[in-house]
Amino acid sequence: MPVETTYSKLREELASVLDRVVDDCEVVVVRRKSGKDVALIAADELSGLLETAHLMRSPKNAQRLLSAKLRAERGEGKRQSVAEIRREFGLEKP
């Protein structure tokens, strides 16, 4: 559930609100008199959300990802380290 604040209160407490957004992965909604409210979200959190939206845009890809997630939750498949995956796909760092 997002935290809400006003524009005036945000101005008074900007540094602490921004720290809260980043440190606690908290979304802060800034309510404005104009009704044009704004949400503050950590940049890395936004990046992850945008990437997820991009990957889920294609129904076929979304189904593949959700099926893989279900298989992983059931313990199916093989465990691999990142290093093993890099080797398998020829992505080893020089």
Image (cartoon, helix red, strand yellow):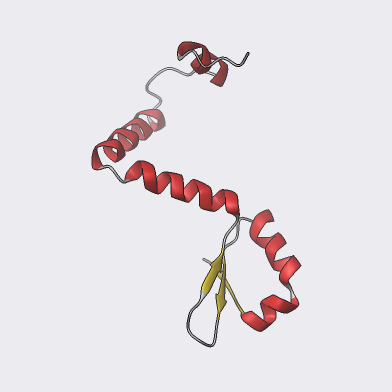
Tell me what residue is drawn at x 63 percent, y 80 percent: 7
User: In this orientation, which residue lies closer to the viewer: 27 or 11?
Assistant: 11
In the rendered picture of this protein, how many numbered marks are placed on residues? 0
Classify 49 as above or below 60.
Answer: below
Which is more toward the observer, 72 or 59? 59
Pinpoint residue 78: horizontal percent, then vertical percent.
43, 17
State the residue lying farthest toward the bottom: 33
Residue 41: where, in percent of width, then height?
Answer: 57, 60
Look at the image and tell me in which quarter the C terminus lies.
top right
Q: Relative to 33, is 36 above or below?
A: above
Q: Which residue appears at 49% of the width and 17% of the height?
A: 85
For this orientation, the residue located farthest to the front is 94
Residue 81, image quadrant? top right
Q: Residue furthest left?
A: 60
* Residue 24 x/y as whole percent: 65, 56
| 72 to the left or right of 25 | left
Q: Where's residue 2, x and y in %?
A: 54, 67
Location of residue 55 (image quadrant): top left
67 lies above or below 14 = above
- For the point 67% across and 83% down, the residue is 8
